[in-house]
Image (spheres, grey):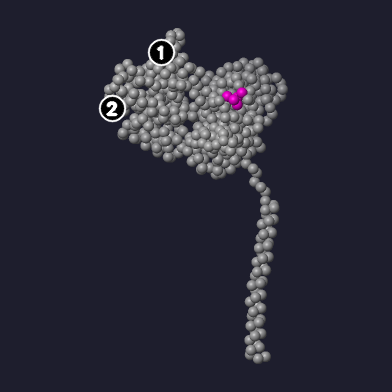
Amino acid sequence: MGFSTFFVDKASRAFRRESFFPRLVLVLSAASSGGLVAYADSKQENAVEPPEKKKLVVLGTGWAGTSLLKNIDTSLYDVKVISPRNYFAFTPLLPSVTCGTVEARSIVEPIRKIVKRKTDPVKFLEAECFKIDSVGKKIHCRSDVGTSLNGTGEFEVDYDYLVIAVGATVNTFNTPGVAENCHFLKEIEDALKIRRSVTKCFERASLPYLDEEEKRKHLHFVIVGGGPTGVEFAAELHDFVTEDIADLYPHLADLVSISVIQSAEHILTMFDKRITTFAEEKFQRDGIEVRTGYRVVKVSDKDVTMKSHSMEEVSVPYGMVVWSTGIASRPVIRDFMNEIGQGKRRVLETNEWLRVPQCDTVYAIGDCATISQRKIMEDLAEIFKIADKDNSGTLTLDEIQDVIEDIYVKYPQLELYMKSKHMMDFHDLIKDEKDDFELSIEDFKNALAEVDSQVKSLPATAQVAAQQGEYLAQCLNKMKECHEHPEGPLRITKSGRHFFRPFRYKHFGQFAPLGGEQAAAELPGDWVSFGHSTQWLWYSVYASKQVSWRTRYLVLSDWTRRFIFGRDSSGI
């Protein structure tokens, strides 16, 4: 073989090697890719689709609705929030907004900002629900920020679980002229309107052509209702006049008058009598007139007409009236109550688990509903039958002890009654110290005859609404677990146990700011406090209860600004 032939043959073998290995790599790569594709296809065929989440619709962004949203596990539910306002407002500070002690934006937090911290997204729709279809499990809504395809702004939303937390509206008791001539104090907008009206009253009274009588009329501020809201607004207004307005309108300071009209014999009737007495005495010292025993029967554009218990009718002129006498159900709730057979009730009724009894998947929390606590005397025969395991017709101590904890949980009035009577155990209730007693059904009935006297409705407060929202969120979070392993008390009229323990409100106390850097507080353990130290306690509690660090900082800043510079009296 010659040199050239050897070189060509060697080069040919090298070329075949170089072209073989790339082709081998390509074949192996294709085979590998095909295997991966086949594996991926196989994995997709064997994959199990995650279960579709239940649709949870929450109506309202007040205390109850926001508390539920903060505690709900969004990985378990497809959550939608529907409300005509896209923010949460710290309503206990609304009286402070009316006089500029706190700015309106300092006590609100956008609801989208609150829910964006959740694991899975929460959808918010700014609209108002005007009809609830519990049979079809859908709600009808109307938006005022846009229109739908048909131009009405109306749409429907389906649900698996519905939580009604729309709050309540002002109760005018159908008093003529109230809706047209009075201010209310339920929303941020109400507080801002009052703030502008207060300034206008002073500017109007400053006009040169008014005589003193006309000026006194324009500077007469009337508050109808002696509850916490009315009393706190009266105190805020008095501080505003004495600390700020007097310097700006020195010629009008002596013409200002503030009146509180209350139909009951005292103001702050839901507080301890010691606080009521302290508040009335302080208002008297401050020059705030308190008219108790009077019921307003008419409000014209010039006068407030009221009647006393002796039917004496009195009319007084005013510059501004604030109506703060209670709450009533919203129209959508009234319509829903008529639909489900609760039309004769004053407010929507739920059971102890916050569920509307006529609807298995509808819950109601906050001011829009009230809990109907089942009475122990209604279930007495069934309780006796469950406890009497040997069917002897009598109950022994052991038989009672087997069910007493479940009775305490399902009927909290029993424990409250025993505490009110200073009873230590069931022996005190049946008035028998022996352990070998046997109770007949008549004896059992006599022992429990007065227990239901402790059944009371919960107050319509932010504290109650927040606790209800948190409780319901916890129940929804563990619904699947509790359906498999119920944790509630024994069912009395049916077999088995309730899935959850019923809602129990825990009272942490209540405050009543009375102006002049003084406040009154009623705290657990029958502890009553009032004075300057209580006002500082009020500052610390209300600052700590803010929904975010942003609002907490803003509120503290507003209080500091007021101490240094005073309140702003601009009419904006």
For the residue pair 426 and 371, the one nearer the viewer reads as: 371
Q: Is residue 267 visible in the rendered structure shown here?
A: no
Asked which secondary structure carries label 2, the reply is helix
Residue on which the image places disc 1: 315
Q: Is residue 204 visible?
A: yes
Q: Please state the horizontal and vertical placement of residue 161, each as a whole percent of the image.
A: 61, 35
Residue 195 placement (x, y as % from top left): 39, 28
Along the viewing direction, whichever of 271 and 229 lies nearer the viewer:
229
Which image quarter holds the C terminus?
A: top left
In the picture, measured across the screen, residue 227 lies left or right of residue 160, that is: left
Report which residue position mark 2 lands on: 247
Side of 403 relative to 553 (left or right): right
Image quadrant in which you'd find residue 445: top right
Residue 337 among magenta residues: yes
* Magenta part of the chain: 334-338
Magenta stretch, overall SS: helix
Q: Position of residue 175 (x, y in %)?
A: 48, 17
Whether residue 437 is situated above or below residue 483 in the rendered picture? above
